[in-house]
Amino acid sequence: MIGSFLREYRTFFLAYILLTSSYLILFYLYQLPWAFFLQSVFLSWTIFLILILSLFWKFFHRMKALQDGIHESDLYLLNKPIDRAYLSLLEKEKDDARQQLLSYKKREEDLQAVVKLWSHQMKVPLAALSLMSQTKKLDPQDVDNQLLRLDNYQANLLNYLKLSNQSSDFRFEEVEVRQIMVDLVKKYRTHFLHKQIAVSIEGKWKLKSDRKWLSFALSQILDNAIKYSQEGGSVQIQLDKGVRISDQGIGILQEDIPRLFDQGFTGFNGREHQKASGFGLYLAKRVLDQLELDIEVRSQVDEGTQVMVRKK
C-alpha cells in the first residue's frame, strides 16, 4: 500500500525535494544564517508530514474501497475529478454492456421464435409428402409443389440467420429486373400450373442492386401473390422504374396493411386461410431496406393486392 502511495504522489515528493534544494542553494550563495534554514526546513517538514499523513489516510481508504468492491456508500471517497471521470466511463461501459446483453437476448428470443415458426412451416409439406407416400398417390406436380415449399422455407431460415448476424454478402451490380422475374416465374411454374393462374410480365427495369438478395425479396412477394390467389386467377408483373406485382386474390384488410412487415404478423385473412406465417414479408422488407428500396402495399378484400417495389 505504501509503495502504491509513493508511486501515486511521486511528483509531489519530487517537487518538495527540488524546492528544499533550491532554498539550500540560495542560503549557501547569499551566506544566510543556517539557523534560519533549519527552522524553515523544520516548519515545512512539519506541514509536509501532516499533509502526507492526510493524503495517505484518504488514499488508504480509497484503495481499500476499490479492492473490496466499491459500494454506493463509499462513492464520497472518490471525489477527485479524475475519479469522477473514471466512474463516468465505467458507468458508460456498464450501460453499453447492458445494452449489448439485452440486444443479444432479444436476438436469441427472435431466433427461437423463428425456429419454432420454421419448424411449424416445415411440418405441412412434410406431412403432405408423407401422406402421398403412405397412400401411394405420388402426383409429380404435388411433389414438386411441396419440395419447392421446403426449399423456400430452408432459404428463409438461412437468409434470416445471415441478416441477423450481419454477414450478408451484398454485391451491387447492374441488374435487369425483368430477367429476375422471368427466372422466378419459371421457379414457381408448378404453383402457377397447380392453381391454373395466368401470369404476365410487362416492361423493363434496370437498377444497381444485389441480384441474389433482390431475387430473394421479390420471390417472397411473388410467393404470396400465388398463395392468396384464387384458382383460375391471374398475376400481373409490371416493370417501369419499379416492380408492381398484382394479384386477384383474397386481399388484405386495411387495418392490417401497416403491420404486414412486422415479424410474425399474419393478419386476419392469413389466419382465416391458415397459410400465412408472417415471415416472408418481414424478411423481404429487411432485405429491401438494405438495398435502399421501398415497398408499398395496396389491397382491397376480395379484389386483390398490389405490391410496389421502387427506389427510395
Image (cartoon, grey):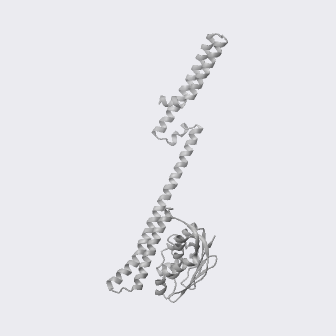
* Viewer-nearest residue: 102 or 201: 201
Above or below, 3 relative to 275: above
The answer to whether residue 272 is visible is no
Q: Residue at x 38, y 77 (%)?
A: 126
Q: Height in image: 300 above or below 20?
A: below
| Position of 246 relative to 18 (above/below) | below
Report the side of 180 relative to 148 (left or right): right
Q: Residue at x 48, y 29 (%)?
A: 3
Tell me residue 63's x, y (percent).
49, 35
Q: Quadrant of residue 32?
A: top right
Residue at horizontal 41 percent and vertical 74 percent from the top? 122
Choose between 46 and 179: the one closer to the eye: 179
Residue 155 locus on image (x, y percent): 46, 71
Q: Quadrant of residue 257?
A: bottom right
Instruction: Specify the farthest residue to the front.
Output: 174
User: Residue 197 location, x and y as percent?
Assistant: 51, 87
